[in-house]
Image (tube, rainbow, N blue to C red):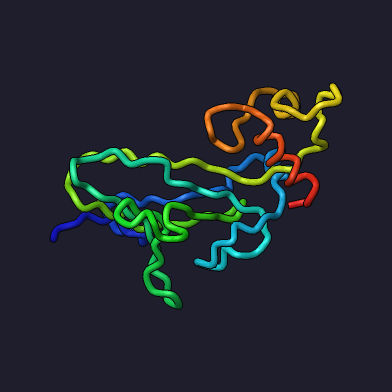
Amino acid sequence: EDFWILPQNQLAGQLFLGTDTGFTPTEARDQIVNWNPGDPRRGRDVAAPWIGLELVRVDGPAGGEFAMYRSEASEGVVVLMSTFSPQETFANTAHELVGGHTHFSWAFTKAGLYEVVLRANTMIEAPSADVNGDQSVDGQDVSAWLGSPLDVTCDGIVDFFDVARVQRVAESGG
């Protein structure tokens, strides 16, 4: 069966895709706490300042599948994201250290135009849970702290669960 690949190694005349967290502003880097994504692929199972990438969706030709992977000398092919086998434990996520960059192989099973949507996430330090001082912990505290609503749990609403996630990080230090 035919498939199309954008390789992780730069080849003349081919698109060279990767991620680069080196442009993360200093003020943002200072708020990212060390956290363990619990992903054993490529050593992503230690506490460090990680930026996570999550596959949200892939739109493309009918019947087309997508995968993002790396070829590692020590581990062979390491699949990071795949629409073909999304049930794998760590499929559909990739983690990069703040200030780093990585190149991946991007594979597609059908010719055509694809839209690959990724969501970046990390853990940030909150100064306290009751940010606005109204004696309650709620979505307004997240808004007050960041200056705008933040849907930390990505469920479509800003609510207690978003604040609880920020509070958990603040209390645990990561």
Left or right: 111 in relation to 51: left
Left or right: 146 in relation to 42: right
Looking at the image, which is closer to me, 23 or 149? 149
- The answer to whether residue 115 is above or below residue 73 is above
In the image, farthest residue toward the bottom: 74
Residue 9 image position (x, y, % from top left): 36, 62
Q: How many marks?
A: 0
Residue 65 image position (x, y, % from top left): 26, 50
Instruction: Place residue 141 in its image quadrant.
Output: top right
Q: Residue at x 47, y 47 (%)?
A: 54
- The answer to whether residue 13 is above or below residue 114 is below
- On-image quarter of the N terminus: bottom left
Left or right: 48 in relation to 54: right
Instruction: Place residue 135 in its image quadrant.
Output: top right
Left or right: 151 in relation to 90: right
Looking at the image, which is closer to me, 85 or 149? 85
Q: Residue at x 69, y 32 (%)?
A: 160
Residue 115 image position (x, y, % from top left): 32, 38
Q: Residue at x 55, y 55 (%)?
A: 96
- The answer to whether residue 61 is above or below residue 89 is above
Q: Residue at x 49, y 54 (%)?
A: 94
